[in-house]
Structure formats: structure tokens, C-alpha cells
Amino acid sequence: MPDNEHTLDPNSRRHQEAVQALFVKNSRDLRFFVLSLLPSADDVDDILQEVFLVITKKAHQFTLGTNFRAWVFRIARITVLNELRKSKKRPCLLEDDVLELLACEGETVLADTSMLDALGRCLNKLDGRMKQFVRMRYEDGLKSSKIAEAFGWTPNAVYVTLSRARLSLRKCVERELRHREATS
Amino acid sequence: MTGTNDSSRPSDAALIGRYLDGTLDGAERAVFQERVRSSADFRRRVVDESAVHAALRDQQTWVEADRVKKGVSGSPLLRTAAMFVGLVAVATICLLVLVNRDGPSDRGSSQATIGALATVVSSSDPEFVIGQVLGAGKLRLEEGFAEIQMIAGARLALDAGTETYLVASDRIRLLSGSIGADVPKGAEGFTVETPSGKIVDLGTRFGVSVADDGKTRAELFQGEFEVYAGDKDPRRYKGSAAVTIGRSGDINEPSENQVTPSEFPMPLLVETIEIIRGEFDQGPFHVGDPAPGIWGGDVAEIVGRENGISPHSGQGMLRLVSSSKYRGPSANTSCNIRQWVDLQDQLFGAAGIEGIRVEAVCHANRIAGSPRIDTQFRLNTEAFKEMPVSTEDMLASRLLQREVSLLSDDDPTTWEQLELSTAIPSGSRFLLIEVGSIENIQDAIDGDQPEFEGHYMDSVEMRIIIPARPSVR
């Protein structure tokens, strides 16, 4: 990356390329953020593409050296809301104010690539049933109702087990990251 | 509804579970929304579980979990993508065509696309299409040459016959053949595993090959890397190095220790060429005879803000004074300063290849207020095979000359940009970059008249673009 990126003309091609490169650098975190707003969506990458087009068009509005993550997350939130409003395939699941509340909370959460490494280790520490349910739900892609059928459980009982598993993983990841920070 | 906290309301766990599955019914949705609005704890829990849910849907999480389970040590942190990508690579990360080759079982298109590890950015093998997104799995290039951009930032070049396994966004296993890697800042830690060891990049440009007998050769062209073999402590190399690792894990450094970059394919390289004092920041400045790293030419000086003009960047800017080495007008009609650049460090064995480009940028401004004020600025670049020692030499060894100019506006509050982009002939070793202003309105020849009443230049930058290439054997 050029050393003097902060002196680039905001309307220049090189400035636009610099903004696009920042998008790539943050694309994993952005994907997690959009997934957390649309947890059951299969077209997250379509939305990311839309966000990419918006940041390309508005690249001149971004000042290099300032908080790109805040800027692009704001654009992603607006893009998700617009997508939910206009999409006939996906009736708006939650109302706008609820989505805004979750989106604002979500921007502060550590849902990024620093979690992935720790999460791999934490998955192996889950106990038997939780680990089994998590693998079936996420690695094998089974819906919770199918898991319930397979074990003769009620769907709500499966939801409770998966919820506990997610919270347990979350705590484990936080411990791992704290430990890494303390020993580095 | 069953599994509720009381007879009328579902539990928080069930609500969140159904929300994440997208199966909230009307009544449950109303309760869910009411809870989000009224309870900060519930809101936080939804977001925490959504974050884990998002990470669990990423195929990479499962690759890491399997590695940890098998006890593979040295699991690298997954790093976010590094800065450099070309426009094609950036755009294609947003596309959704995934090909899994001999990798983990297909988990369905949505989860598979989430597990993208790399994108094809150039290819002459018909099996690999530009923009194709690659997940974990084996990759074999049957013919031609290809470049892939790893999600974590490393850019790789592969020769025909090369077989690799994409393990993670910053890790590959080279099974046979040759690769070249460019790993920009922020993507350090990129790892190439081979049958006899592994190479961990610390911010560099390097090549790795695996021979039919499993022996590994790794060459460092710039930066640093670490070589791991067997149970031995890793060895770190800087700058330039050639290392072989035998099947038994023995590391050898060939006695000649000469790198041979042409024997490895190399990805595209875009690198800033350092122009010394290109920002014209305040400090001692003397225009002498031009040389690598030194501005030479006509009379010019570095100044701070003056005549209503502020520097384009930093605290200083260059003021052009006269069209000769002496203060005061001369018969010449332009004031130019120039600097030589030696490309030796940038070329990495690319000397002799076609298609190398250089781009140069500078900024110009001037005072206004009179129609007699000259308005023209210029940016010039020339390429040479050798450093000339005389004017005759210059003419004889010059391979290229390109120039742009502009007529500046009347607004001293705005800087205007001159930009030049040109291919340079193969065999170019030295570049000359030259900036200046031209007496296009009034040629001052009277000793009392200033030639340039207030003409300024600032922020001179240059970069070199070396195209990707296969190995040359």
C-alpha cells in the first residue's frame, strides 16, 4: 500500500482502490456482522456485494486514516435494513427499531476473526451432547427440528441445549482470548 | 408452545433459538421484539449468541476444530485480509461461485461460500476462472500459470503441474511443483507446509518448490521467513537466502547461497518506489547534481505556507525559482528538478521481463492575480539501461521518455495533480523522475524580473508494477 495514502485525492482511482482494499481487510468481520443481523439468511454474500458497490461509489466520502470499520458497518446496517424492507422473498422478520437496537449492540461485539481460532479449540471442549448437537446443527446443516426428531426430543429442548452451547462457547472464547492477551 | 418459562411465554433460549433458525411465529416474534426493546440483558444475549452462530456457520471454524482435535501444533491466528488487492480481486471476493476440490464434504452452498479461502485472480488454465472462489481442498494446475489471492492477504503464483492443498485463509500445503508468494503487511504468518517442513512468512516475498523426491527448496527474496523441519528449532532468515530441506528434515544452506527468483513463478507486485524528500518537508535542502536519492537541477527551495498557498501535505512544499543553476532569469524557459532511481532492489529477478509499468504522481499550484503569470507545470520520467555520466551517454542509453503537463487554474487554494503511467522497456535499470514549471506565458530575461513569481510543487510519488510471471527455467 502506498506510504502516502493519506494524501491521496479522494476523487482519484488510487483513493478508491485504497478504500476497496480496506473493505477486503475487514470483509470477514463484516460478514459476521451481517450474519448476526440476518442469522438465517443464505444470501449474505449478495448483501456484502451490495455493500461493496456502495463503498466503491461513496469512496470519496471516506477519509483514509479514520475509522473505516465504523463507516462500513454503518453502511452494512443500512443495506441490511433496505434489503429487508424491499425483499418480497423475505418478509421483514423484525421491526426497524428492533433491528437498529440489535445492530448497534452488534457493532461492539467481538464477532470477528480473532474469535475463530479460539472457537476451534473451544468446540473440542464442549461436553458430549452439546458438541453433538452443535456439529449436527452447524457442520452437518440440520435444522433444530430434525435434530429433535433424531433424538426424540422436543424442538424447544434442542433450542435450549444449543443456546447453552453457544453461551458456553462464548465464555470459553473470551477466556482463551484473555489468556492469550495476558501471556503475549 | 412448549418449553416455556411460564404458561404464556417461551423461554429466552427457545426464542433466541427460533430467531436464529428463522422460525419465529407471529406470537413469538412479538414477544422477542418486546424483550429486545425492554431488556438490555436479553439484547446482549441475542447479540452474543448471534456472533457465535455466525462463527459456527463459517466452514473455517470446523477446519480449525479438526486440526486442534488431531493435535496439529502451531495453529496460526487467522488474520484479517491485508491491504493490497487489485480491483478484480476485491470485486470477486463478493461473488459467490465456490469450487470445492477433493475437500471436506459439501455442506450446501450457503455454508460452503462462507468458507472461501482464496480467489483466482489470473489464470491460463481453463479449469480456473478469474473470480472463482476457492474453499478448503486440493488444487492442481494442469497447464499454464495462475495467481490466487488468499483471503488473509498473501498473493500466490503457481506454475503448471503444481499441486497444493488450501488449508486455511493463511495456510497451504505444497505437495509438488513451485509457488511464489508476495505477503504484504498485515498478512504475516502465511505458512507453506511441505512434505519435509514448513516455511512461515514474516512479511516477505519468497518462493518454495517441492521436487519429486519430496525435497523442499525455499528462497527468500525480500523480508524475513522462518524455516521449520523435524523437531529442530526454527531458523530465521532475512533479506536474501536459499534453503533446502531434505526428506529427513535436515536443513541445508547451499554454499553459494544465491537466490534464483527466475526459477519460481511470481505474483503481481505493486510497490512504492521511495522518492527521497518527495514530500519536500522542511529541513536542509540543496539542489545539486542529480543522483539516486538526491534532487538535482535548477534553483528551487523548500518553503512553508506563503502567498496564500499551504503545502499539499506536511509542513513544506517546493518553490521553483529559476531556470538555471543560478538565481535570476536565464535563456532557459523551465525550472526543473530531478532525481534518479535505481530499480535493482525492486526487480527481484524480473529484469528482462516485459510489461513492467511505473506510475508517477505530483501536485502543482501557483499564485494568481495576473494574466502574465506562467501557468504550465510538467512531470517527466525517463528509463535507462545504465546510469549515464554525460549528455551523450544519456541519449545513448535512454530507453524511454514520457511527459505530461498541465495548465494550472487560478485558484491558489487547490492543488492540481499530474499523473503519469507508462510501461518501461525490459532492460530498464534506472529511472529519472523530473518535475518543473515552464515559462509558457512570459519568458523573463531581465535580471530584475522573477522567472517564477510563485510556483510550487509537492507530494511526488512513484510506484512500480511488475506483472505476474511463470518460472523461467
Image (tube, helix red, strand yellow):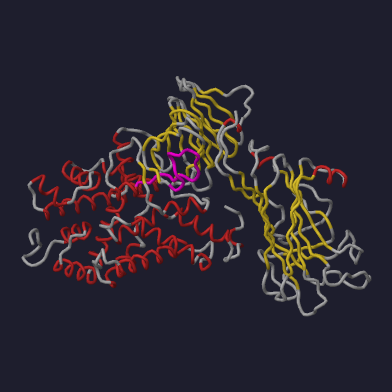
Magenta-colored span: B115-131
Residue displayed at 77% across by 58% down: B284
Q: Which residue is nearer to you in this view: B420 or A156?
A: B420
Q: Quadrant of the C terminus of chain A?
A: top left
Q: Quadrant of residue B140?
A: top left
The percent coordinates of residue A158 (x first, y second) are 14, 51
* Position in image of residue B43 (x %, y %): 25, 65
Q: Is residue B432 visible?
A: no
**Horizontal side, residue B364 vs residue B23: left or right:** right
Q: Is residue A94 visible?
A: yes
Q: Residue at x 62, y 26 (%)?
A: B257
Q: Which residue is the extreme one toward the left?
A: B7
Report the predominant secondary structure element of the magenta stretch.
loop
**Depth check: B241 or B416 in front?**
B416
Give x and y (percent) for residue A145. Answer: 13, 52
**Residue at the farthest front position:** B126
Which one is nearer the viewer's eye here, B124 or B359?
B124
In the figure, residue B355 lies in which quadrant? top right
